[in-house]
Image (tube, coloured by chain):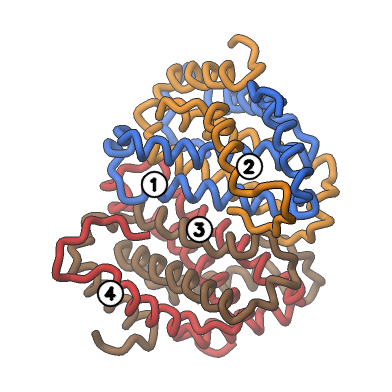
Chain colours: A blue, B orange, C red, D brown
Amino acid sequence: MSAITDVTSLRDALRAFCAARQWQPFHTPKNLSMALIKEAAEIVEHFQWTTAEESQALTPEKKAAVADEIADVLMYLVQLADVLDIDPLAAAREKIVKNARKYPVTEPTPKGHS
Amino acid sequence: MSAITDVTSLRDALRAFCAARQWQPFHTPKNLSMALIKEAAEIVEHFQWTTAEESQALTPEKKAAVADEIADVLMYLVQLADVLDIDPLAAAREKIVKNARKYPVTEPTPKGHS
Amino acid sequence: MSAITDVTSLRDALRAFCAARQWQPFHTPKNLSMALIKEAAEIVEHFQWTTAEESQALTPEKKAAVADEIADVLMYLVQLADVLDIDPLAAAREKIVKNARKYPVTEPTPKGHS
Amino acid sequence: MSAITDVTSLRDALRAFCAARQWQPFHTPKNLSMALIKEAAEIVEHFQWTTAEESQALTPEKKAAVADEIADVLMYLVQLADVLDIDPLAAAREKIVKNARKYPVTEPTPKGHS
């Protein structure tokens, strides 16, 4: 496996990983969206009973566990984007432009964005 | 805003975006995990009544809408990782190594990974 | 529609509602699980930027909006249980017995149940 | 614990269960919404790699596991409604009336309700 240094090389590594295991038939957008939200929920679980402050001061063990879940979400997100032929960084660029219009800086913005 | 070409420049753009709107107090890990899963659910919503096949053949409009949600998930994920001082690509690298051990290629792997 | 006074009459009302609209083919367990989590996320969205205190002091409008989402989750949950021939109240009874064993009262229980 | 035969007696049993363990301080609406979606994701996980058909033909073991997760979702939903002083069955009644107006029977309704 070549080095994973960005979203593109991560995508390629995941393609190879799935191909070697013949997982592609399972990796429909529908199924990947389910796997994605399951992993997002594992992040939520780490914070469900914590205060805001506790969520900002994780032990090294907890931090490593959350990093593991963040990796899972990123990996399913990249795979979902891949099967749909979507460039996630390009999508983010466009979304930031939209958000800048939706939440202009000049006025105080009450937090309520979705 | 400088060009967003990778996860690091996306992180920096989001930092600047939030700082300009004074959103940092809201961006605790706990809150960001909630925003993240809300956006993941918006992806799920696009596929909830579709067949596997339909989920693979989106109209251009639908594809653009899903790209928009993928952007939202990526952006909250990058922000969550940032406030926790986690490198998401490094986490993905480590996770792929773990997964390669968990799902060796030599034997047929029934899909059931979490 | 006869009066909805309990989980059973709610289930029956939802059966009639779906039958009248020929929605049953869409209501597979897989699809209903997706619809369920989408509605759960709409509850989460109401609380994602609030403090714990704010989440306990909703305006009447906000409370009505959350009630609406709670209804959606309950309705999809009842429908999911129905298509799987699961009695949700019986399942809850069994789960409380299990939880009582898992979290005995005699010792102080640090909150961390899943 | 008295018999759990409906949503009200389930609510009362859960109140007693939490009080005995001094869990009430953790059970803010915000936290309960997170616990709720985590459990909804455990249902999703059971179906993420299955076909629609497979999701309708669970083994007894799998069915019991899903029933367990359905119980968790129901229990957190009832607790969330309780701390917000919302009657979930009343909310469902109102929502069905709304939905009947939104999706009238007379015309064919393409499935796309949220």
Residue type for callout 3: Ala
Q: Is residue D89 left or right of residue D45?
A: left
Query: Do the dots labelled 2 and 3 sit on one chain?
Result: no
Whole-number angstrom distance, CA of label 2 to CA of label 1: 25 Å
Q: Residue at x 57, y 43 (%)?
A: B39
For disc 1, the neighbor class at 10 Å (few under 14, some 14 to 19, many from 20) is: many
Is C53 above or below relative to D69? above
Q: Look at 53% across and 34% down and name the residue there.
A: B77
Task: Tell me the CA gap for discs 4 and 3.
Answer: 26 Å
Q: CA distance from mark 4 to mark 1?
A: 22 Å
Give the secondary structure at mark 1: helix
Q: Which residue occupies 24% across, 72% down?
A: D17
Q: Residue at x 52, y 34 (%)?
A: B76
Task: Identify the residue position indicated by label 2 in the image.
Answer: B100
Q: Circle 4 sits on which residue?
A: C100
Which SS class for mark 2? helix
Specify the amino acid type for callout 4: Ala
Q: Which residue is mark 1?
A: A46
Q: Which mark is residue C40?
A: 3
